[in-house]
Image (cartoon, rainbow, N blue to C red):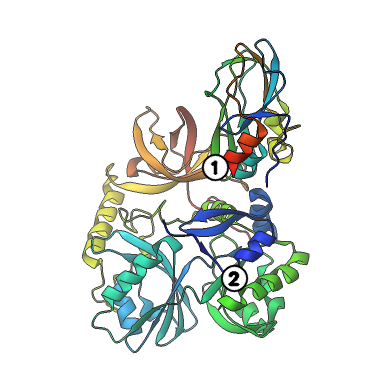
Amino acid sequence: MTSPLRTPLHDEHVALGATIVDFAGWEMPVRYTGDIAEHTAVRTAAGLFDLSHMGEIAVRGTDAEAFLDDALVGRMSAVALGGAKYTMMCAADGGVIDDLIVYRRDWDHYVIVANAANKDVVLDELFDRAEGFDTDVEDDSAEIALIAVQGPRAQGIVMEMTARGADDIEAMRYYTAAHVLLEGDVHAFVARTGYTGEDGFELFVGADEAAAVWRLALAIGEPHGLIPCGLSSRDSLRLEAGMPLYGNELTRETTPFDAGLGRVVAFGTEKNPRGDFVGRAALEAARDAWKASEEDGASHARRLVGLVGEGRRAARAGYAVLSPGGAEVGVVTSGAPSPTLGRPIAMAYVPRSLSEPGTRLGIDVRGRTEPMTVVALPFYTRTA
Amino acid sequence: MANVPDELRYSAEHEWVAGDLAEGAVVTVGITEHAADALGDIVYVELPSVGDAVQAGSVCGELESTKAVSELYSPVTGEVVEVNAALEGAPETIGADAYGEGWIFKARLTAEASDLLDSEAYAAITE
């Protein structure tokens, strides 16, 4: 057993009284004050998250775009400078190795953000897949801290944190990014991205400047209602927003099509064809099977659905989904009592024939069946 | 560090017991501050019913938070004589006052509660 890793903000979390848990080999704050208060702050004002456990992998070189077009299922050459793209790395058999956000920082420079638990696997795959390309793959995870400011007040807070470039923050569209200078002479790469279902920003700064940026965000954010938020609220926020979590909705045994995310796979068009990429043949087969099951309603095909409970007991990952007749027909991938809806919510894989919104199913919650209804994802959509 | 009052007795499943532990006595049961902290905000409590026979070490209810769910194990063997019905509408009371207003049920012991831990022994297993 290796000793747990700590982010550059570990001392800040301890000083704030956070409850620290092991997460993917990292000592991370699970909460500071309370899960629901933190969840609600992000929905109504703003929350501050330390995401420095996530992996940052830089890809540079003349062939950077050709390499990533081959290595990932999305077409990274089509991402504009300063743009970001949600994508996945798949195996040759179409299984998801990780879901990723890729930022294009220059014509020959991309940054890939990978899940903490998958960073080493993604890195090894990138090294393997880079063979034959004039490109350089580098793990910058230890040098970069990632701090997220999320919530309806995030824009105002990040603008106030910015010494040079506040206009760029204001003008920034969702899934784009820019370089700004934060108060305290800190250079930051700021992206309008997140994992909460709210507007928000993710700030990439040097590890040695992380504590200063964290404190700046707390000081400026506090009058706006910002509080530090742990991994527990991050999970309930992403679940309400219907966003998949690797290890739950996405695994090596699922394809992007299984998870309802086939749109992230770019096969190319007649006008704009795309060449081969890792997993292409298997993913074409997965797409064709998915399309066929849409037409004939084949019950063997599975779909990721949202379920809302009528009672109070929540489903949790791994619980069995039951047909109205009581037969086991699927499995819950994530579930929790939704702080925003005030009812239990879950995501689950079920047969295509039982995936229509309004379908009534059950979930075996520790020996008792709780009634659930299929709903369209996401559970929560922000209004502003 | 979570508070572990000296005057209570504890189970390894993180319940506390207050009162005389002899057969026939009525004890009060709750979960420890350590357990409440680990669960986070409790949003739902399934209480045992008055009249239920509970067995030491057996499940008699459940506690659900946003993050996790935990079964409630009875730390004693006896009959439930009262439940804290206020928790149905205000389950967060457990997190706010685990050893006071957040008590869960009272039971009349049908056997002496002999296998409980003192505060020092319980504190040692939560370290």
Query: Which sits in the foreground, A57 or A270?
Result: A57
Check whether the beta carbons of the residues at disc 2 and disc 1 lie within 8 A of each other.
Answer: no
As measured in the structure, the alpha-carbon distance from the residue carrying label 2 to the one carrying label 1 is: 28 Å
The image shows residue A205 at horizontal and vertical percentages of 57, 77
Circle 1 residue: B68
Q: At 56% from the left edge and 45% from the top edge, which residue is drawn?
A: B67
Near mark 2 (Cα within 10 A), the count class, few <14, some 14-19 or many ≥20, is: many
Q: At 30% from the left edge and 75% from the top edge, which residue is drawn?
A: A127
Question: Can you tell which mark lies on residue B13?
Answer: none
Q: Which chain does the residue under circle 1 lie in?
A: B
Query: Which sits in the foreground, B120 or B112?
Result: B120
Q: At 61% from the left edge and 74% from the top edge, which residue is drawn?
A: A210
**SS at mark 1 in the image:** loop
Tell me if A294 is positioned left or right of B73 in this view.
left
Q: Is residue B65 visible?
A: no
The image shows residue A46 at horizontal and vertical percentages of 67, 62
Q: Which chain does the residue under circle 2 lie in?
A: A
Residue extending farthest to the right is A223
Total numbered labels placed on residues in the image: 2
The image shows residue B101 at horizontal and vertical percentages of 76, 32
User: Which amino acid type is shown beneath numbered disc 1?
Assistant: Ala
User: Which amino acid type is shown beneath numbered disc 2?
Assistant: Phe
